[in-house]
Image (cartoon, rainbow, N blue to C red):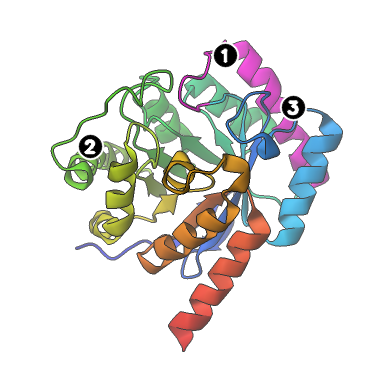
């Protein structure tokens, strides 16, 4: 087993992953599955970003393309108009912010980093949706969050099947990690992709066996926030799923998560603090 990487370099700033970190979600979209994460005007974008920073977010994740199951596709130009506006605004007004761009399109990723000031690429498809993405990551050599997704957002929940969900995803990661490492990419973060081409049972299996992803030797990001595995299990809406999110985030931390991607920063930061206190005790 490889020793897990302890730091990532985001725009010349080292993020110490000995302490679990919190990534706040900013959706510059009108249709993301949780309406509380949607912001579109510059005033709302800046207010939401400032609030997350004040609450302790270590990274802000900015996306302009809804990837909820069944989401409509949008052209690259529209996604870019949403994302670039937000990244430039936050870079200018909150220069201390570390910004990830949530996109599976290589042209959006490249411009967000080179032209707008983003520091991290967060790709839900792990390079599957755009054949040029891994080459762009190799060229930019910025931290790359590589998520597993089975299928495409519109169809990913249509009867996903695995022989062994953990083993299959680890095998999928292995080839991509080898390519990126061979090209000199230093900072790779793996995300098993809760809810992206997985049933509720697949998701809970991933959570139970999260520790097995340590075999990659890479930092582990989990995105459980208000996901349908919570709402379907508890028979509640996404709006009511904060308590369930906090519980699953706490389990994820105990099982080795290094970064929590969340809609609700304050509660996630509290979970991290209590987790660390428990470990210290």
Disc nearer the start of the sequence (1/3): 1
Kindly indicate the quadrant of the structure image that contains residue 191.
Answer: top left
Looking at the rendered structure, which numbered label has been put on residue 85?
A: 3
User: Mark 1 — residue?
Assistant: 76
The secondary structure type at the circle numbered 2 is helix
Q: Position of residue 154 (x, y in %)?
A: 43, 18
Q: Residue at x 68, y 29 (%)?
A: 28
Element under label 3? Answer: helix
> Magenta stretch: dominant SS?
helix
In the drawing, what numbered circle is on residue 2?
Answer: none
Q: Dot 3, crowdedness within 10 Å: few (<14), some or many (≥20)? A: some
Image point 53% across, 20% down: which residue? Answer: 107
| Residue 119 makes an appearance in the image | no
Where the N terminus falls, by quadrant? bottom left
User: Start and end of the magenta stretch?
Assistant: 67-94
Residue at label 2? 172
Q: From mark 1 to mark 3, how far is it between C-alphas?
A: 14 Å
């Amino acid at each position: 087993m490889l020793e897990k990487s302890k730091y990532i370099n985001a725009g010349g700033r080292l993020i110490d992953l000995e302490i679990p970190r919190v990534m706040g979600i900013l959706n510059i979209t009108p249709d993301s599955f949780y309406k509380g994460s949607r912001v579109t005007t510059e005033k709302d974008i800046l207010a939401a970003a400032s609030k997350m920073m004040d609450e302790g977010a270590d990274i802000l994740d900015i996306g302009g393309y809804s990837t909820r199951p069944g989401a409509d596709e949008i052209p690259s130009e529209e996604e870019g108009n949403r994302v670039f506006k937000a990244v430039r605004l936050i870079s200018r007004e909150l220069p201390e912010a570390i910004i990830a761009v949530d996109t599976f399109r290589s042209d959006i990723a490249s411009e967000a980093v080179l032209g707008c000031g983003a520091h991290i690429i967060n790709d839900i498809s792990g390079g599957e949706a755009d054949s040029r993405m891994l080459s762009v990551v190799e060229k930019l050599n910025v931290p790359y969050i590589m998520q597993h997704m089975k299928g495409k957002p519109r169809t990913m929940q249509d009867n996903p099947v695995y022989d062994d969900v953990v083993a299959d995803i680890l095998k999928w990661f292995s080839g991509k990690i080898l390519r990126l490492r061979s090209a000199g990419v230093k900072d790779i973060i793996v995300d098993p992709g809760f809810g992206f081409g997985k049933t509720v049972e697949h998701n809970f299996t991933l959570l139970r066996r999260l520790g097995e992803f340590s075999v990659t030797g890479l930092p582990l990001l989990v995105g459980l926030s208000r996901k349908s595995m919570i709402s379907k299990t508890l028979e509640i809406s996404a709006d009511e799923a904060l308590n369930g999110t906090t519980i699953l985030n706490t389990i994820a931390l105990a099982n080795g998560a290094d970064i929590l991607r969340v809609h609700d920063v304050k509660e996630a930061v509290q979970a991290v603090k209590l987790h660390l206190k428990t470990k210290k005790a």
